[in-house]
């Protein structure tokens, strides 16, 4: 399940993930990404992960197609907010691998710090 969020920052695409992600949900989020890229914007993402239930195979295919077509150069910052400690370790590794954009993990209690990160010049 993907639920779009309004975090009060117009330039940031914000959503919550809980359970299994469907192809329709993935397509919906990627359409927002594409719209912003085609408008010449760089992407800043606020992703709140409540639970991880996997993704439908077709949802994964849609995500791979998106990255094939648009790459990662259009991303600026990604803040991942979750209470899952093991995800913080993965986010840290991804942040080191993908130097083209700034990615950080935050605990659920630190949502305000995630928002500060997304709006800072860091």
Image: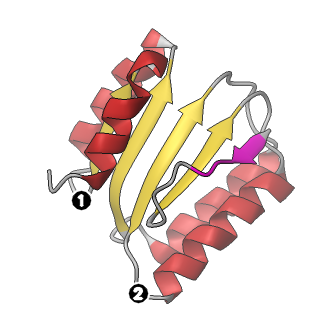
Please tell me the numbered disc located at residue 71.
Answer: none
Query: What residue is shown with label 2?
Result: 40
**Residue extending furthest toward the top:** 85
Which quarter of the rendered picture does the N terminus lie within? top right
Q: Image point 47% across, 29% down: which residue?
A: 81
Query: What residue is shown with label 1?
Result: 100
* Element type at mark 2: loop
Q: Do the CB atoms of the residues marked 1 and 2 lie less than 8 Å apart?
A: no
In the displayed structure image, the side of residue 80 where residue 94 appears, left or right = left
**Residue extending furthest toward the bottom:** 39
Q: Quadrant of residue 56?
A: top right
Residue 77: x and y, percent? 32, 53
| Up-down relation of residue 65 to residue 8 (above or below) | below
Mark 2: give few (<14), some (14-19) or many (20+) Cα within 10 Å: few
Query: Which residues fall within the magenta stretch?
Result: 2-6
* Element type at mark 1: loop
Q: Image point 24% across, 59% down: which residue?
A: 100
Residue closer to the observer: 77 or 53: 77
Residue 119: x and y, percent? 29, 53
Q: How is the image coloured?
A: secondary structure
| Up-down relation of residue 40 to residue 50 (above or below) | below
Q: Image point 58% across, 76% down: which residue?
A: 34
Q: Earlier in the sequence, mark 1 or mark 2?
A: 2
């Amino acid at each position: 399940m993907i639920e779009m969020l309004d975090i009060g920052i117009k330039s940031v695409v914000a959503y919550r993930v809980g359970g299994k992600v469907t192809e329709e949900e993935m397509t919906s989020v990627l359409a927002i990404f594409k719209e912003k890229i085609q408008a010449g914007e760089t992407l800043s993402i606020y992703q709140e992960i409540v639970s991880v239930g996997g993704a439908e195979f077709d949802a994964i295919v849609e995500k791979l197609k998106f990255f094939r077509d648009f790459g990662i150069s259009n991303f600026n910052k990604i803040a991942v907010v979750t209470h899952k400690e093991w995800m913080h370790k993965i986010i840290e590794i991804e942040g080191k691998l993908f130097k083209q954009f700034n990615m950080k993990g935050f605990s659920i209690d630190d949502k305000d710090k995630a928002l500060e990160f997304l709006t800072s010049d860091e």
